[in-house]
Image (tube, rainbow, N blue to C red):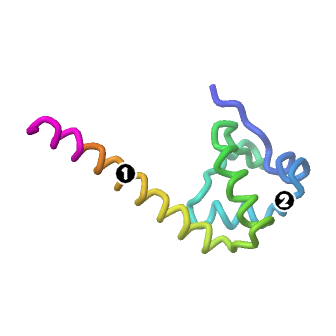
Amino acid sequence: MNELLSIEEYCRLHSAAPEFLFELEQIGLIEFVSQKSTKYISIDKLNDLERFRVWHYELHINVEGIDVIQNLLAKQREMNRRISELERSLKFYE
């Protein structure tokens, strides 16, 4: 079972505005779990949320910019995976 942290508690601990987290959720960067009338984040998603928080509050990147960065990083990971695949294939033929 996933451990959960309430959005309210996360915001209190990290001095983050709940609106920022809800914007992340709205554009699909983070997913919350709702139980009764409270929203929670899974503990295993905290690394992503912390990275977004740092980008937003320390680097002053807006939510749309965070989305662009995440998409570019995902593409880079996919390209690196594909390059590794191609290198393995090439070694087979050497």
Please state which amino acid type lies under the numbered disc 1.
Answer: Asn
Q: What element carries label 2?
A: loop
Quick one: quadrant of the N terminus? top right
Dividing the picture into quadrants, the one containing residue 15 is: bottom right
Identify the residue shown where x is 49% and y is 59%: 73
The secondary structure that most of the magenta stretch takes on is helix
Determine if the magenta segment contains residue 67: no
The image shows residue 47 at horizontal and vertical percentages of 67, 45
Alpha carbon distance from label 2 to label 1 = 33 Å
The image shows residue 45 at horizontal and vertical percentages of 64, 43
Extreme front residue here? Answer: 94
The residue beneath circle 2 is: 16
Q: Is residue 53 left or right of residue 29?
A: right
Q: In this view, does 32 lie to the left or right of 83?
A: right
Please state which amino acid type lies under the numbered disc 2.
Answer: Ala
Q: Is residue 72 left or right of residue 51?
A: left
- Say the numbered circle drawn on residue 59: none
Q: What stretch is highlighted in magenta?
A: 86-94
The residue beneath circle 1 is: 80
Identify the residue shown where x is 75% and y is 72%: 60
